[in-house]
Image: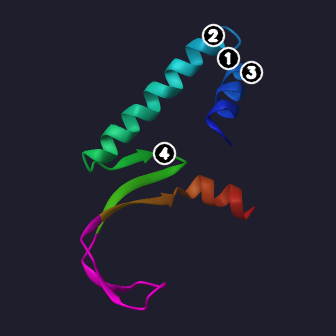
């Protein structure tokens, strides 16, 4: 589902709001989520899942083109874990 499809689905469920208002609300929610992840806060959406930031330690990698060793530095990655309700819906 794209952001446009999400806005259309929410608009269909809330006929009292204009699509423009819903677009602004969706954009604000996304920007708030992005800001929270950037601050390394845990985001917990009950029934859907949670987003956390995990730290990856430095390691040795390999350049697939040349085969030479390269250093891959410390990095942070966003990790998503599905909630129980979402997992039940997916698995039937």
Upstream in sequence: badge 4 or badge 3:
3
Give yes or no for contact between labels 2 and 1 (Cβ–Cβ under 8 Å): yes
* Neighbours of disc 3 within 10 Å: few (<14), some (14-19), many (20+): few
The quarter of the rendered structure image containing the C terminus is bottom right
| Label 4 secondary element | loop
The Cα atoms of the two marked residues, 2 and 1, are separated by 6 Å
Q: How far, Cα to Cα, is label 2 from label 4? A: 25 Å
- Residue plotted at (41% across, 84% down): 63
Which residue does the numbered mark 3 point to in the structure image? 12
Mark identifier at residue 43: none
- Is 78 above or below relative to 43? below
- Find disc 1 in the rendering and name its residue: 14
Mark 3–mark 1 Cα distance, whole angstroms, equals 6 Å
Crowd rating for badge 1 (residues with CA inside 10 Å; few <14, some 14–19, many 20+): few
Position of residue 71 relative to residue 3, above or below, is below
Q: Is residue 2 above or below residue 23?
A: below
Asked if the residues shown at circle 3 and circle 2 are in contact, with their CB atoms under 8 angstroms apart, the answer is no
Q: Residue at coordinates 31% horizontally, 83% vertically from top-left?
A: 70
Taking the magenta stretch, the answer to whether it contains residue 64 is yes
| Mark found first going from the N terminus, 3 or 2 | 3
Disc 1 is placed on an element classified as loop
- According to the picture, the residue beneath numbered tag 4 turns out to be 46
Q: Nearer the viewer, mark 4 or mark 1?
A: 1
> Residue 27 colored magenta?
no
Q: CA distance from mark 3 to mark 2?
A: 9 Å
**Magenta highlight range:** 56-75
60 relative position to 62: left or right: left
Circle nearer the N terminus (4, 1): 1
Which circle, 2 or 4, is nearer the viewer? 2
Q: CA distance from mark 4 to mark 1?
A: 21 Å
Q: Is residue 6 above or below residue 43?
A: above
């Amino acid at each position: 589902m794209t952001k446009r499809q999400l806005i259309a689905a929410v608009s269909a469920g809330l006929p009292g709001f204009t699509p423009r208002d819903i677009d602004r609300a969706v954009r604000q929610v996304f920007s708030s989520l992005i800001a929270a992840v950037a601050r390394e806060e845990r985001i917990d959406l009950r029934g859907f899942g949670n987003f956390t930031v995990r730290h990856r330690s430095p390691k040795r990698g390999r350049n697939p083109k040349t085969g030479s060793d390269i250093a891959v530095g410390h990095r942070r990655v966003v990790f998503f874990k599905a909630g129980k309700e979402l997992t039940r819906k997916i698995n039937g």
